Amino acid sequence: MTETSTTNAPGALSGITVLDLSRLLPGPYCSMILADHGARVIAIEDKKQYAADGLFLPTVQRNKAHMSLDLKSDVGREIFFRMVRETDVMIEGFRPGVVRRLGVDYDSVRAVKPDIIYCSITGYGQSGPARDRVGHDVNYLGDAGVLDLIGRPGGPPVIPGVQMADIAGGGLNAAIGILLALFARQRSGQGQYIDISMADGMLAFLPVAQYWQALTGQAPLRGDNMLSHRYACYNTYETADGRYMAVGALENRFWRGLCAALDLAQYADLQYDERRREEIIAAFRAKFLQKPMAAWDDALGRLELCVSGVRTMDEALASSLFRQREMVVAVPRPDGTTETALGVPVKLSQTPGSIRSPAVSFGESTRRVLAEFGYTADQIETFTRQGVI
């Protein structure tokens, strides 16, 4: 495993300060991206129950400071607005209307910091008929028509094992929006408000499905379209040991090469033949059942065929592919131990991202952050007694 050292190397966002009021996954994932690339991120939460219930996710808390603060109290809001004065970006993930009730909405914050970039991440956005609806990842996938496409033909929709809406629809889109707003502020000097809807983000995942509908006149069916099991060239196949191979031989040259490698050359000219589609898939299924996954991976993986084994998460984390790419790294902790972390996927040559510090625990940085913003030890003790922190 590649070991990363805690370094102060500047990233592309060095000098940018972010206050993150969000919780769970979408907002913290966004602020982790910003922190990985040099931003100073201070995460603020008052939901100590989240930590008690195991809903505090440490794997998105690296490179950050984390503090507890009661924004419902006058003193808590006073502390918050002192911090706002030195902040470039604010992220929040409450339901619409909550930040206004707390007194930390966009208008209130920009009254103190006029050029603030303020990003709200919600399930359904700040406008529209669903703005007040509650939801989780599966609901946003369902409303956007994405979940309907996942699963076996004739079977029920299958929930993905990763949080697509939270990470892509929420966290990644929020990071993109914030970077765009920072770029615009460089030119105009003005901040702005960013409205991120996770359901919007999932609907934006449908360009290929929309094209398929326009091309064929029929909406794509669950598990039965060009990029989802309809043809042998883009499918998954069980192997002799109960594992699976993923075949993505979409282009004809890859398909012909695969047919030759599997001694199934009789199908080379029939890649998208509708009449013999099921026959071809059955032939491929029978062929792949003849060897275990590792043997197929060895025989086909090095050829230009777009074929790979379906790995478990443990296998992926242990693979040389991701370790040499520094996507699985060992991060030193202050106590001398290390933690395994997922690396920084965006590789910049001049201002690379880095993991400068391990994940923080809930509220770990509270006293240090308050001291950095000018509060004395006696004041901090008073805040503790009052339940402000």
Image (cartoon, grey):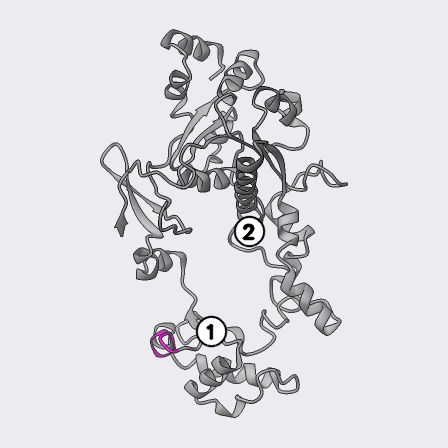
Q: Please report the bounds of the magenta region as a residue range.
A: 297-303
Q: Position of residue 150 (x, y in %)?
A: 61, 61
Q: Amino acid at mark 2?
A: Met
Q: Position of residue 318 (x, y in %)?
A: 32, 57
- Can residue 179 be seen in this snapshot? yes
Q: Position of residue 283 (x, y in %)?
A: 52, 85
Q: Position of residue 91 (x, y in %)?
A: 55, 33
- Residues 187 and 240: in front is 187
Residue assigned mark 2: 164
Above-or-below relation of 373 to 291 = above
Q: Name the residue at the bottom extreme.
A: 266
Q: Does residue 40 appear to the left or right of 318 in the view shown?
A: right
Above-or-below relation of 295 to 101 = below
| SS label for mark 1 | strand
For the residues marked 1 and 2, what is the alpha-carbon distance in whole angstroms?
25 Å
Above-or-below relation of 67 to 179 = above
Above-or-below relation of 69 to 117 = above
Residue 230 lies within the magenta run: no
In which image quadrant can residue 324 be found? bottom left
Residue at left offset 44%, top offset 79%: 289
Residue at left offset 59%, top offset 58%: 158
Q: Does residue 302 appear to the left or right of 104 in the view shown?
A: left
In which image quadrant can residue 242 be found? bottom left
Residue 299 lies within the magenta run: yes
Disc 2 packing (10 Å; few <14; some 14–19; many ≥20)? many
Closer to the N terminus: mark 1 or mark 2?
A: 2
Q: Which mark is residue 225?
A: none
Q: Which mark is residue 238?
A: 1
Q: What count of labels does the image hold?
A: 2
